[in-house]
Image: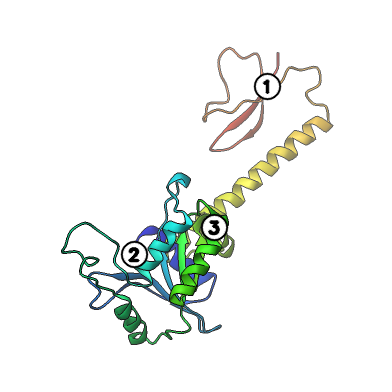
């Protein structure tokens, strides 16, 4: 399970309250595997989830390209390749073994929902049409979920700042705590600046606020200086001329 799949798996566990099974090998599937299978005991929903994420928008798929991926991953149709010894040239289809794998694991072929995760889609206005046409041809309903717009923000919102054993959730909790503390520092800065303005502490002074790497408070050549606020990341200094 790669990083993206691990994040998506964590999302389905934490946000959709699912039990998950990752990297499911498809028996007799010529090295095929399903990224994630998930089941919710609360709603009864069953999911087959496939992930293909690139964070560069220019590399994101079009709706038409996504359907080609659906054919490969959900329908079991091999992609067309040159040569006479390819699965495509031999007319093979792995849809049956994918369905058999669902049944072997106790999933309902009728109830299972297919989910495709990508960063985003280049032409979202065309997505519904292509997904609907795929459904009409195969009977498979596919939901396309944006990793950027849904998975990341919803998972970040769901985690707390507790010490998770899961490394993905722990990473998200650390980032969330960092954001919380950073917002507190910014609030202190804004409050200090407003207070100084209200008290007119710097009237008739030329005051410069600058950001720099941690430096000693005393620097040769300055007539005087007043410490406003210091942190491990930056220090604000008011210079009086």
| Residue at 20% in and 69% down | 90
Tell me the distance, in whole angstroms, between the alpha carbons under discs 3 and 2.
Answer: 31 Å
Label 1, residues with CA under 10 Å away: few <14, some 14-19, many ≥20: few
Q: Which mark is residue 151?
A: none
Q: CA distance from mark 3 to mark 1?
A: 52 Å
Image position, residue 5 (x, y; %): 40, 63
User: Is residue 47 shown above or below 199?
Assistant: below
The answer to which quarter of the image holds residue 190 is top right
Q: How busy is the neighbourhood of tag 2: few (under 14 within 10 Å), some, or many (20 plus)?
A: few
Dot 3 alpha-carbon crowd within 10 angstroms: few under 14, some 14 to 19, many 20 or more: few
Q: Is residue 179 above or below residue 70?
A: above
Q: Which residue is mark 3?
A: 126
- Picture coordinates of residue 213, whole percent (x, y): 52, 29
Q: Which residue is mark 1?
A: 208
Relative horizontal placement of residue 81, taking residue 16 as reference (left or right): left
Which of the colour schemes (rainbow, by chain, secondary structure, one colour) is used? rainbow
Residue depicted at x 79% and y 35% = 195
SS of the residue under disc 1: loop
Residue identifier under label 2:
1
Q: Quadrant of the N terminus?
A: bottom left
- Sequence-wise, the earlier of marks 2 and 1 is 2
- Horizontally, residue 175 falls left or right of residue 37, namely right
The local secondary structure at tag 3 comes to helix
């Amino acid at each position: 399970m790669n990083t993206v799949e691990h994040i998506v798996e964590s999302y389905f566990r934490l946000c959709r309250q699912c039990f998950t099974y990752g990297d499911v090998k498809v028996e007799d599937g010529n090295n095929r595997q399903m990224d994630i299978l998930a089941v919710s005991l609360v709603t009864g929903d069953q999911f087959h989830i496939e992930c293909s994420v690139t964070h560069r928008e220019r590399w994101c798929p079009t709706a038409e390209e996504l359907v080609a991926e659906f054919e490969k991953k959900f329908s079991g149709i091999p992609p067309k390749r040159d040569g006479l010894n390819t699965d495509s040239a031999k007319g093979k289809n792995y849809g049956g073994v994918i369905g058999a794998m669902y049944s072997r694991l106790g999933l309902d072929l009728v109830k299972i929902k297919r989910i495709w995760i990508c960063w985003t889609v280049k032409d979202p206005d065309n997505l519904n049409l292509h997904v609907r046409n795929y459904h009409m041809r195969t009977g498979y309903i596919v939901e396309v979920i944006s990793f950027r717009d849904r998975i990341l923000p919803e998972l970040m919102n769901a985690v707390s700042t507790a010490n998770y054993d899961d490394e993905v959730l722990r990473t998200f909790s650390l980032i969330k705590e960092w954001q919380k503390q950073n917002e507190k520092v910014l609030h202190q800065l804004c409050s200090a600046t407003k207070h100084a303005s209200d008290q007119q502490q710097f009237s008739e002074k030329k005051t410069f606020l600058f950001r720099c790497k941690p430096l000693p408070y005393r620097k040769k050549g300055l007539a005087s200086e007043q410490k406003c606020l210091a942190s491990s990341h930056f220090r604000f200094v008011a210079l009086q001329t």
